[in-house]
Image: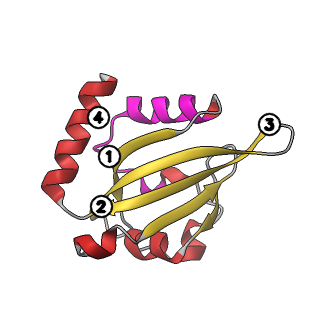
Amino acid sequence: MRIDRTTERRVTLFSETDLDGTILFANDAFCNVSKYQRDELLNKPHNIIRHPDMPKQLFELLWRTIRNGEVFRGVIKNKASDDSHYWVNATIMPFKDNNEKIVKYVSVRHLISDEKAARELYEAQVKLYKLM
């Protein structure tokens, strides 16, 4: 699925996971872009969409950040169900109850349809976080 730049700013891929990363909710945009049916995503680990090009260190940083109660922001290459890929600008945050206990994680992502721009943003992120 290719979305023009005007539309991509309005399309939000949204999901919620439990504390172990199991998908509890996936909106229509997430299903459409990832090419999964909702029932193929629910109750599955969020890493079902992890692209093998993504370094392990990025996800270690992501999990360390959100488990510490902080917000993670980054550019991520994901794998669709047909093995194609798509890039997202992701914001992943812990959701806390009234006692400040983390009860789930919420992920809000925006599609980056310009492959060159996505790669450039990703490379800048790799340098920033010293991932390689």
Q: Which three-letter amino acid code belongs to the residue tagged 1? A: Pro
- From the image, state whether disc 2 or disc 3 is nearer to you: 3
- Give the position of the N terminus as an image quadrant: bottom left
Question: Is residue 62 in view from this perspective?
Answer: yes
Q: Which mark sits nearer the N-terminus, 1 or 3?
A: 1
Looking at the image, is 100 positioned above or below residue 68? below
Q: Which mark sits nearer the N-terminus, 4 or 1?
A: 1
* Secondary structure predominantly adopted by residues drawn in magenta: helix
Segment colored magenta:
48-66
Instruction: Tell me where residue 58 appears, x and y as whole percent.
Output: 40, 33
- The residues bearing labels 1 and 2 have C-alpha atoms spaced at a distance of 12 Å
Q: Which mark sits nearer the N-terminus, 2 or 4?
A: 2
Q: Which three-letter amino acid code belongs to the residue tagged 3? A: Glu
- From the image, state whether disc 2 or disc 4 is nearer to you: 4
Q: Which mark sits nearer the N-terminus, 2 or 3?
A: 2
- Magenta stretch containing residue 77, yes or no? no
Q: Which three-letter amino acid code belongs to the residue tagged 4? A: Gln
- From the image, state whether disc 1 or disc 2 is nearer to you: 2
| Label 3 crowd (10 A; few <14 / some 14-19 / many >=20) | few
At numbered mark 3, what does the secondary structure look like: helix, strand or loop?
loop
Q: Which three-letter amino acid code belongs to the residue tagged 2? A: Tyr
- The residues bearing labels 1 and 3 have C-alpha atoms spaced at a distance of 34 Å
Question: For this rendering, which residue is in front, 67 or 35?
Answer: 67
Question: For this rendering, which residue is in front, 130 or 55?
Answer: 130
Question: Which residue has dot 4 on it?
Answer: 125
Question: Which residue has dot 1 on it?
Answer: 52
